[in-house]
Amino acid sequence: RKGTTFRSVENKLYLFLHSHWNSEFALSAFSTGIHSIINPEPYLDEEMMALPDVYDDTRGENGELISGIMQYYATLSHLAAHSLWSEKLMADNYAPQLRLFVSVFEDARVDTLAIRKFPGLKKIFLALHPFPEKNACDDLKVSTLRFKAARLSRALLDNDFNPEDELMSEFRNQFKALLSDNKQSSTAEMSKL
């Protein structure tokens, strides 16, 4: 296969995870080549981190080349941050739309904490994050929930991103206040935003 395969960098990934995050999680790869209905995403469970079997080099939002190994490092950092700072949240009774936005806030929180630990992550996280233009999605023709979630997520991580939305700006201010002065906040606080 083309790209950077999990198998070709597996030892480097274990070394990165242990040396940077002091983590002993097992790593596993899932196939990305046969999924037409479901597009699996990296995940973390009690004992393992699951990653794609291959990452192709890609272009970031500003056109910079992001290698497959850097995408693996960014993914591992995101998952490791969840393992360190996320708490279990009983969200079974939350509507799917609410779960989506709780996840947006929690992902942004752990990424913010990861960036504090390793400031160089900010560049790669932002490069891999979508930069959705305000009017790129017509809410009269399609559901814009995921589009708005992507805009909010970008606003939470990128101080230079103008959400052009009063509610998103207010959520960003509340989010920043919860994490100000090197506070960590919590998963529970994110669920209340």
Image (cartoon, rainbow, N blue to C red):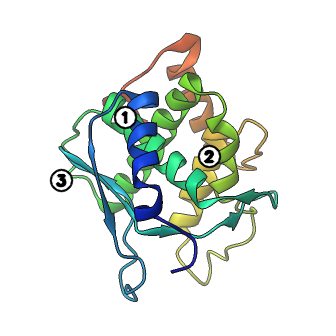
Q: Which residue has dot 1 on it?
A: 192
Q: Amino acid at mark 3?
A: Asp
Front in this rendered view, residue 124 or 173: 124
Using residue 154 as the reference point, say whether residue 16 is left or right of it.
left
The mark nearer the N terminus, 3 or 2, is 3
Looking at the rendering, which quadrant does residue 166 occupy?
top right
Are circles 2 and 1 on residues that touch, CB within 8 Å?
no
Please, is residue 92 above or below residue 145 in the view? above
Q: Residue at x 58, y 60 (%)?
A: 68
Q: Amino acid at mark 2?
A: Phe
Mark seen at residue 35? none
Q: Which residue has dot 2 on it?
A: 125
The spot of residue 105 in percent (x, y) is 46, 41
Q: Residue at x 64, y 28 (%)?
A: 119
Disc 3 secondary structure class = loop
Please, is residue 92 above or below residue 6 in the view? above
Disc 1 secondary structure class = helix
Q: Amino acid at mark 1?
A: Lys
Q: Which residue has dot 3 on it?
A: 92
Separation of residues labelled 3 and 2 (CA atoms): 29 Å
The mark nearer the N terminus, 1 or 3, is 3
Looking at the rendered image, the disc whose residue lies closer to the viewer, 1 or 3, is 3
Front in this rendered view, residue 16 or 150: 16
